[in-house]
Amino acid sequence: MSVKIKKPIYLTVDFEDYRYNFSRDFLTKKKYYIDEVEKQYWIIKKIFNKINAKALFYIVGEVADKLSKDVVEDIKKNYDIGSHSLSHLKLLKMSDEEIYLDTKKSVELIEKKFLKRVLHYRAPYFSIDKNEENYYKGISRAGIKYSSSLRKKYIDSNNIISINKYGIIEIPLRSIGFGLKRITVIGGSYFRLMPIQLIDKLISDTIKLNFLPIIYLHNYEADFTAKPIIEKNIFKIKLKTNDFLRRLGRSTVENKLIYLSKKYSFQSLDNFVRK
Ligand SMILES: [Zn+2]
């Protein structure tokens, strides 16, 4: 009997309150929905258990600060942690000082809650295009060592890019196309909306192109019973469209992960960088 060795694939979870993010950005209303965030945690954790997945959770600082002891202890016991900024703002136009202050505050909140060093960071919306210098300067001053925020079409080196000037290891994701909405391999909306065969193919191609295979999910990704952010309002079309797209395909996530788990073993990005 031959035992098939599964190839590693790296799983990350951007841990955030999307209802807060959307209400703030589209309705200028600031309110956290931590009960919903925690419900989503238990949904995704149950799936991860089924497929024996390890993962790295990038947590928004203000969300970490509000989490219950149960969720904090469970994440600590089962997964690795990093920061996903203080309150999920885009970094595109921030100075290095602003990025430093945002990251530092976020790291403080997460470390205080989890009693664990935070060395990993992922930028909200991967929003570092053309602002890389300020980005790496800012996060390195805040003590970050590993980043996975850069999207590239090709990579010259194998899997990682060393940002020697700032002592940062960047683990980039492959992207296809142009602009902010380009396809990033593979996660978020693309993972929910694309057929599994295409996802599988994109992952294989990405490995051939020397990128590390990373699946990036969010805590809300499998929460397919979530209510829309606004129910009845003929205005706010942009919010409604974005919210609709964020909820589309959530019911497919579990089966897609199970499919991939037959071929790959899900690992934490932290295991990779510490090898
Ligand atoms: Zn995010």
Image: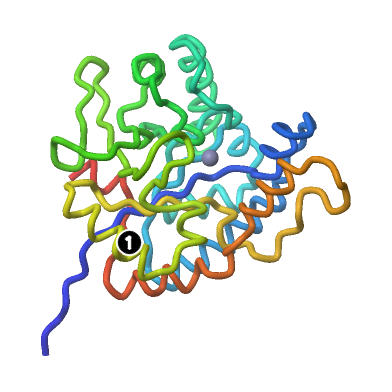
Could you say where residue 161 lies in the image, as x and y percent from the top left?
Answer: 21, 31
Q: Is residue 97 above or below residue 187?
A: above
Could you say where residue 120 lies in the image, as x and y percent from the top left?
Answer: 37, 35
Q: For the view shown, which residue lies furthest in the bottom direction?
A: 1
Could you say where residue 46 lies in the image, as x and y percent from the top left?
Answer: 52, 68
Query: Which residue: 79% across, 33% down?
Result: 27
Query: Which residue: 36% across, 32% down?
Result: 119
Query: Which residue: 47% across, 29% down?
Result: 127
Amino acid at dot 1: Phe
Q: Is residue 17 above or below residue 108?
A: below
Could you say where residue 9 lies in the image, as x and y percent from the top left?
Answer: 28, 58
Quarter of the image for residue 221 reads bottom right
Q: Is residue 130 above or below residue 46?
A: above
- Where the N terminus falls, by quadrant? bottom left
Q: Nearer the viewer, residue 186 or 221?
A: 186
Q: Is residue 62 left or right of residue 58?
A: right
Q: Is residue 246 left or right of residue 252?
A: right
Instruction: Kindly tell me whether mark 1's CB lies below 8 Å from ligand 1.
Output: no
Label 1 sits on residue:
266
- Residue neighbourhood size for the residue with mark 1, other residues' Cα within 10 Å, grouped as few (<14), some (14–19), many (≥20): many
Quarter of the image for residue 146 reads top left
Q: Nearer the viewer, residue 112 or 274?
A: 274
